[in-house]
Image (spheres, rainbow, N blue to C red):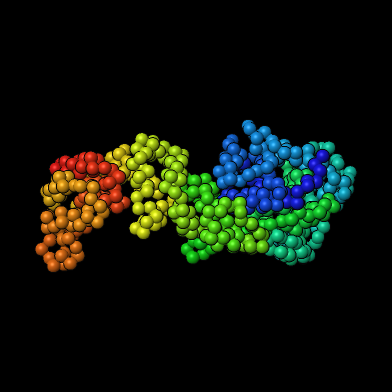
Amino acid sequence: MFPPRPQDFVTRIAPSPTGFLHVGALYMALISTQLAYQKNGIFFLRIEDTDDKRETETGVADILSWLTRFGVKIDEGAIGENGTEIGNYGPYTQSKRARFYHVFAKRLVEKWLAYPCFLTEGEIAEIRDSQAAIGKIPGIYGNYSPWRNESCENVVARIEAGDPYVLRFHAPSAIGSRVKVYDEIRGTIEMDDNFLDTVLLKKNGIPTYHFAHLVDDRLMRTTHVMRAEEWLPSLPLHYQLFRAFDLPVLKYAHTAQLMKIENGNKRKLSKRKDPEANVAFFFEAGYPVLAIKNYLCGIFDSGFEDWKMKNMDLPFSDYVFDFARMPKSGALFDLKKLDSVSNIHLSHLSNEELFAQMLDWTGEFRPELHAMMIAERELAFRAIGIQRGTERDPKKFTRLSDVEAYLAPFLRGAFEALKSARGSIALPVPKELAIEVVNDYIEHLDLEMNANDWISWMREEAAKFKFARDGAEFKAGGCVGKFGDYAMIIRVAVAGGTNSPDLYEMMRALGADETRKRLGDFADEMHNR
Ligand code: GLU
């Protein structure tokens, strides 16, 4: 029914439909899709929805849409229109696969390798207490498992009486045995073998991860299981399960846990505490997709960053990933580093491309700003390009979301908000002088001058009002203020605040009329202060 596949590389991602895509899962999807592409393999999506509590209505759709945005190409799964399935190895959703789990379970029971266990919660607690009292490892195993070797009659009688039970694996190894397992990233590892009679089917007949993974990955003909490092300790159990079915074990690659540094200590990136564990965070924060991709690949393949720096223009798909270059543990996730990768990435985009991406970002997360950018498109576009890539501002933007603060002094609607907040800015000179300065500026403003002439002119204008032209003049004394104080008055008038992009470029982008209007409004405002 599910014949071997012709491909040598078949892998998958298997998220729960919580709508939450962990950044580690995204990384795995990126690598998997790339490896599958390079090896003419298959990459499919399986939805692990056996834990009802964790589902959300749009969970699967959200995950799919994020993966799609990152260019992850999924070959099979419930990925068609309205969730229809594509591929011959389904169903690709665990809740639709009960019959498979049950067939496999029966097989193990027939071989005496799994057994129904009727222990109640209370009885399990008692066993654990008795183990703890004599310093034994707690759990259901060996002689501590009363149902392990129970007679068939007794078991059948309990089942017929309708008593609830779980199905437990009859672990073949005893406490203290060791086993060698193989991981594609770590090579051969020797570890403690599994001795616990792990639950395979819960009381409601739903499989645990360990069992479902065997059934699904076997029937779906997975060749490589890529999953998080947290599953590595379960690998001996998974080897035992495959052997119990006389099946060859799969190839496993456990990707290093993402860590972050907090107060000087490394700790696991936490789904609860760290917003950046959720892929949704990166979109809202304004990181461009390719920067996130580049950053993640840099963490997980030690050769990637160098390659990327040398081949800025080659597509991601040209890079050949290799398990051998992947970290074995503790991969450090650092938003500052992501900022720098993002900054470099954005600095390579054309003005047109950057502007288009900023429009997309505001369209999704700042609809009002988006509408303003459309309404004053030419101005917005020109503003973005100011000094971009020149010596004075080589790496202008770090995130797409920088557009919000950056464009505020340019766009009319956004400028209004800055204006209404500037009342609290203390001016370096009495308001009467500020009004004189501004009125004079309106009269003599000439934006046809080049930047050098303009700055010389500004200094002379400043001198007219007894501001120092430069530091030396200020030191000599007798001035009402520094040249910077003079410029600040103009800046607050034109840009609405004490920080702004280059004033000359800004005024040129706004045009003389708008600039004069802003200066005039500021003078009026000063009168009423
Ligand atoms: N649902 C499991 C998880 O999210 C899948 C692990 C696997 O890929 O096998 O951890």
| Residue at screen point 58% across, 56% down | 297
| Residue at screen point 65% across, 43% down | 74
Q: Is residue 338 left or right of residue 128?
A: left
* Extreme-left residue of the structure: 478
Q: Nearer the viewer, residue 448 or 184?
A: 448
Q: Position of residue 370 (x, y in %)?
A: 40, 38
Q: Is residue 306 above or below residue 279?
A: below
Q: Is residue 305 left or right of residue 150?
A: left
Q: Is residue 188 left or right of residue 433?
A: right
Q: Position of residue 76 (x, y in %)?
A: 69, 41
Q: Is residue 335 visible?
A: no
Q: Is residue 57 visible?
A: yes
* Extreme-top residue of the structure: 82
Q: Nearer the viewer, residue 175 or 26?
A: 26
Q: Image quadrant for the N terminus?
A: top right
Quarter-wise, where is residue 522 in the image? top left
| Residue at screen point 43% across, 45% down | 352
Q: Position of residue 113 (x, y in %)?
A: 84, 51
Q: Image quadrant for the C terminus?
A: top left
| Residue at screen point 67% across, 37% down | 78
The number of callouts visible is 0
Q: Position of residue 49 (x, y in %)?
A: 66, 41
Q: Nearer the viewer, residue 36 or 131?
A: 36
Q: Is residue 514 above or below residue 273?
A: above
